[in-house]
Image: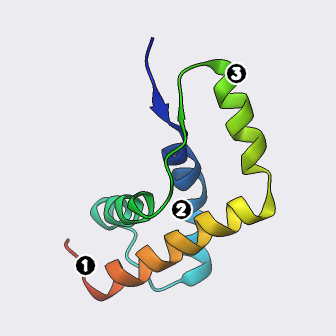
Amino acid sequence: MEFHNYMEDIVLSILDSVLLDIGGVCDCERCKLDITALALNNLLPKYVVSHKGRVYTKLAELEFQFKADVVKEITKAVEVVKKNPQH
């Protein structure tokens, strides 16, 4: 059996749309990875080990506050990387 941090999937699925909304952000692979890592470090992990766990986590993702928290952390990470790009 293996485990997976489902929060990674959520951040990666939202990242491109947040970058488009903010604009003026480098979208090279390194900057995207830095943004993702920073955002994930500030979000609670959502580890799952089964299909049932993925379903429950996916349901929680539908909550407005949950998505707002993810977007907020991605936006904060974008600002940090925008000021200090490592590419």
Q: Is residue 86 above or below residue 60?
A: below
Q: CA distance from mark 2 to mark 3?
A: 25 Å
Q: Are marks 2 and 3 in contact (CB under 8 Å)?
A: no
Q: CA distance from mark 1 to mark 2?
A: 17 Å
Q: Is residue 55 above or below residue 73?
A: above
Question: Could you tell me the amino acid type at mark 1?
Answer: Pro
Q: Which residue is mark 3?
A: 52
Q: Which residue is mark 2?
A: 15
Q: Residues within 10 Å of mark 2 (few under 14, many from 20)?
A: many
Which residue appears farthest toward the left when viewing the image? 86
Circle nearer the N terminus (3, 1): 3
In the picture, which quadrant includes the C terminus?
bottom left
- In the rendered image, which quarter is residue 86 located in? bottom left
Going by the image, does 30 lie left or right of 62? left
Q: Position of residue 50 (x, y in %)?
A: 60, 19
Which residue appears farthest toward the front when viewing the image? 44
